[in-house]
Each structure stands twice: as C-alpha cells, then as structure tokens.
Amino acid sequence: MAKSPKETLDDFARAKLDALEAQALRRRLIETDRREGAIAFRDGRRLVSFCCNDYLNLSQNETVKRAAIEATEKYGVGSGASRLVSGNHPLFRELETRLAEWKQAEDCVVFGSGYMANMGIIPTLMRKGDLIVADELAHACLLSGSKLSGARVEIFRHNDMGHLEELLAAHRNAAQHCLILTDGIFSMDGDAAPVEAMAEIAKRHDAWLMTDDAHGIGVVGHEGRGSSFMGTAKADVPLQMGTLSKAVGAYGGYLCASRAVCDLIRTRARTLIYSTGLPPATAAAAIAALEFMRANPDYCKRPVAKARAFTRALGLPDPESPIVPLILGDAELTLAASALLEAEGYLVTGIRPPTVPAGTARLRFTFTAEHDDADIARLAALVRERILPRRAAE
C-alpha cells in the first residue's frame, strides 16, 4: 500500500533530522527562565548566563518593566491591527522620535522585528537592475532581503575594503542604484565594520550604505549610540537599521533615515504593511530603556569593559564589543565544551553551522553590564585550564 502524504512528509523530516544528528547539527529548544543579574534557570539549576544579548540587562530593569505594565493597563495587550490600519498606537511616534534623535537622523520607522525590518527595507529600495554589495558575514536577514529584492548581489570578503572597491569598480556602472550592506558589530565574531571607511567608499561610487546595528546600539560608540558613532564624528550612514531586542531589552526592529526614505518605507515595505504593530507594552519598554541609556552613558560602557577583563585574563586581543568568540572548529567538541561549562554553573551555548561557516563552530561569550567580576574571572580560568587544552589537542 502506498504511503499517505503525512507518512512521506514524516519520512522526509526524520531523514533530515537523522542526517543533522549525525553531524552534531540538530537543534533543540531548551526552556530557560531568565532572571535579573544575568542569571538563568534550566531544569531547576541556577546558571550564570554568558550567551544572552541583553547586554545592559534592561529586560529585567524595574523601570522598564513598570513602563510595560502601565502601557498594557492603558492601551491593552496587543495593537490589534497593522500600523496602517488602526494599530499605530500613540507610543510608536514617541519611540520613533527618540530613536531618530539617538541616531541623529531625521526620522525613524519601527518594525515588528529586526528580521522583518531587513526583509522589508531592502526590497523596497532595490530591484532588478540594481546592485547590492554585502559583507560575507552579514546577518542572514540582510542576505535574505537582498535575494528577495531581485537585485544583483555581490559578496565581498569580510571587512576587506579593497575587495569592496574591486566589486564596485567592476559592477557599479552597470547598475542603476547600488546598496552596500554590513553589520555594524558582527553578531558571531564581535568585531566592528570599518563604517567610516565604508561611508567614504560609498560616496565615491554613488552607493547607499546601510548598517545593521543590532549588536551596536547601547554598547559601542559615543554614549552607546552605536557603530556609526565609533569615530571622532558620526559616520555618514544614510540607512541605520537595528533592533530593540538586544541592549534595549525589548523587541522590534527599526530604520533611522531621512524623512523621505522613512515615508517611502511606511508606504511600500511589505513587512510593515502586512504585519500587526508591536504591542504597546513592548514600545513602552523600549522608550524607557532608551531614556535609561541616555541618562547613563557610563553604564553603557560596562559590557565591553567586562568582555575585555575576560580576554585579558586569557591573553586574547581586546574585543570591540561585548561579544567574544572562541572558535573550536568541530561541532561535537563545541557541544562538549558547552556541556562542561554548564556543569560548572555557566550557560554558554555552542554555535554551529549554518549559523557560522563550516569548520568554525564556537563558544560565543556575551558580556553584560551586571556580570559579576568574580564570575568572569572563574569562567576565564575554566576556559584556560579545561577548554583551551582540548582545542590544542584537536
């Protein structure tokens, strides 16, 4: 008897899962109860988390939480519709105004998530006949948005400005419009893009520069304003995209740009037009977090300072962000190292392909403002004494 469609679908799924399991690449959701001070509970065990993007611990901040509660009581749980219908509650305009001021831009548009922002922005600006040039380590949503646009996509070697220039020289004249894409701070490596140099290159080639500052806002640059502000003056980046789910501690994505660009995005970006607006509580939390960041610039410096204490204890180069990767290469070795640290009371998730390139599986350590210095010192000692020797033996 022939198998039913359900049976053939299940066979397909099981075969895929078995293949991933054999490569130590299968993923599983694990319930994690996050608390204040970078603490997490798994299976009843208290762990110190070094794998969360809540860099300023603002998701647990009492003022931020209170703002979310008050907004829920006033406006309700959900926005009820897309922003262009009736879901554009009053908190959106305040949030967008604060973000535009923070990024020194004319205007801002808030999306449901960072992924939705890039999937909406890029196809709105680019189409067939245009050229997109992206860093090879740019976030997956930048590359997905690029493919969706229909534009020609060229990839330059990571942070290689010479290769970027070569690609522009070879292909720019054949395209009507050109967009350069990069992360401001790269999520898996923690290094910064040379944004100022890229802005100069973009100007020479009549290209638009767009940075994804998901991991930059709140923790790098002047007063924590992000990667466009890491130099002596703000870099000329006309398209500053980012998220509200990392250092801001809430949820959502945004684009800070000119009024004309933001108006176009509001009118044409499909992921904005056809998605329900962020809940009022989420917008209120982000507003409160941005106000906290503005009032506490020294606090915003703490995650990078904590990361540097860790790398200096290990004799590693100073990081440019709160993200410190320890590349182990092999996926099984990485999972074993993660399990070793968890047994010692630390939560550090192993990162494996396809999130990172094949052969570069790693432990990705992230540091927050509230990490205890003693926990950092003990973590460094464990890495030095029990993980680095294993890597050397491979």
Image (tube, rainbow, N blue to C red):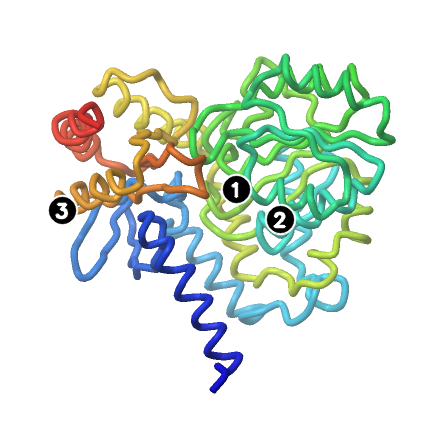
Residue type, mark 1 in image: Leu
Q: Residue 74: which disc?
A: none
Q: Position of residue 51 (x, y in %)?
A: 33, 42
* Classed neighbour count for the residue bearing mark 3: other residues with Cα under 10 Å, few (<14), some (14–19), many (≥20): few
Q: Is residue 4 left or right of residue 99?
A: left
Q: Which residue is mark 2?
A: 95
Which element is circle 2 on?
helix
Task: Mark yes or no: residue 44 visible.
Answer: yes
> Picture quarter containing residue 225?
top right
Residue type, mark 3 in image: Ala
Q: Earlier in the sequence, mark 2 or mark 3?
A: 2
Marks 1 and 2, how far apart in space? Answer: 9 Å
* Relative to 32, residue 107 above or below: above
**Image depth: mark 1 or mark 3 in front:** 3
The foreground one among 314 and 239 is 314
Q: Which residue is mark 3?
A: 343
Furthest residue toward bottom: 1
Q: Residue 290: which disc?
A: 1
Q: Earlier in the sequence, mark 1 or mark 2?
A: 2
**Image depth: mark 2 or mark 3 in front:** 3
Determine contact: label 2, label 3, CB under 8 Å.
Answer: no
Q: How many marks?
A: 3
